Image: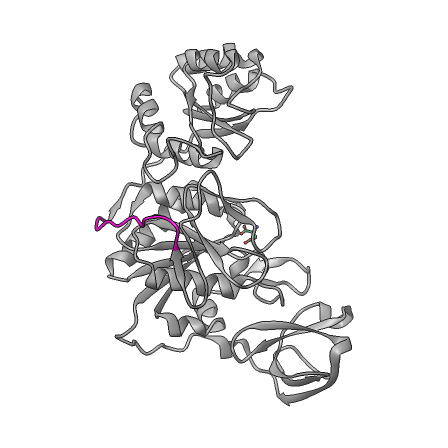
Amino acid sequence: MPKYKPGDLVGIETKDRKYTGILMERPELSGDNYLVIKLESGYNIGISLDRIKKIKKIGTGVKREKFKLKKHKKDSSKKDISILATGGTIASRVDYITGGVHSAFSAEDLISAVPELGEIANIHGKQIFNKFSENIVPRDWIKLAKATEKEIKKGVNGIVITHGTDTLGYTSAALAFMLKTPVPVVLTGAQRSSDRGSSDASLNLIHSAIVAARGNFSEVVVVMHGETSDSFSLIHPATRVRKLHSSRRDAFQTINSKPNGRVSMNSIEFFKEAKLAKELRLDTKLEEQVFLLKYFPGLNPKVIDDLVKTGYKGIVIGGTGLGHTSDLLFEKIKDAIESGISIAMTSQTIFGRVNMNVYSTGRILQDIGVIPCEDMLSETAYVKLMWILGQTKNPEKVREMMLTNYAGEITERSDI
Ligand code: GLU
């Protein structure tokens, strides 16, 4: 292997196929049993060394500049979409010294690495920030919402936002509450980085671009792999989607509802009536002092006092079962509510809805003033409470707004 350097254009012959591509830089080259090449189509594939009969160098040192965005000629028969990059694995590559994964590709890199995008639409790209999504803070949601509004005002037909998967569901919910959009706004990410043979980055991006360009709806959605192979992606409602697996390509699922639809290379199919609107409106005021508290047996009730003292204005509890906490907390919760803090209850079961009328625990918590959040995800309720408290601190108004469905986050009835 030492004869070949990352960036070399190589011809590889296996027992059954021939490949030509650029040898990708990766630590596995030194020890592991396979190599990765980038094919002309832009896809990366891994080839096991045992399968390789012949390898020859065809060209030397292709520089990364080769992948820089070439100006796409505008094709008036195609829709226009903007790809806004925020970081995450979808824009990551391996650091060959530490072996860690770092955000590295700009929006231009992404587009150039996935040439199919140019066939789907006229692509405009912009990097909004470059963060792993665990580092994203609520102010970044605001920045992103403003950038999205700005792109929509330019007249594009749809937006794709590339994002780390870890906190993608929080950002999608935040955008859904803050932004009324007349065009599709599609968030997507990748579980495996673009320089891995098993990467889901290209396909998620392509499917998202198809949805943004051809989807006839006015909503924020998340598009991610629908199963482990590359056959289709699901279109998830922004306030209902959750990452349910740390590594699978089909980690994202719609919770307590069904996906809006699914997309493959040749089709988009919708399972629900699409939301259609003309209005573009931005409402980015957020109260950042909201706490998301997962109840657990043994939780020290004094934590509630501490949260009040720290200055929190709202608390969303991920309670047990139908929406419960230990009775040891009741007194502290009551004091907090009396001091003006809004406290809302979701269930840590993830699936299902809270019902605080069934057991005395739930009834007492309701009497104290806890707001039952129906079938809302805890993360969505957390973002929603921030957004509501950004607009009003009136406890009755907060309750009324928490129980109003603004962005598909509540359904009146659950099908079991
Ligand atoms: N933890 C990083 C993030 O959420 C990388 C994981 C990913 O993108 O899937 O941005």
Q: Is residue 320 above or below residue 66?
A: above
Q: Residue at x 35, y 54 (%)?
A: 185
Q: Residue at x 29, y 27 (%)?
A: 392
Q: Residue at x 30, y 72 (%)?
A: 78
The span shown in magenta is 270-279
Query: Can you tell which quarter of the image residue 47 is in?
Result: bottom right
User: Does residue 271 show up magenta in the picture?
Assistant: yes
Spot occupied by residue 123 in the image (x, y as percentages of width and height) = 36, 69
Q: Residue at x 50, y 32 (%)?
A: 352
Q: Looking at the figure, which quarter contains the N terminus? A: bottom right
Spot occupied by residue 22 in the image (x, y as percentages of width and height) = 60, 80
User: Does residue 76 show up magenta in the picture?
Assistant: no
Spot occupied by residue 120 in the image (x, y as percentages of width and height) = 38, 70
Query: Seen from this angle, which residue lies furthest left?
Result: 278
Q: Is residue 408 left or right of residue 378?
A: left
Spot occupied by residue 160 in the image (x, y as percentages of width and height) = 39, 59
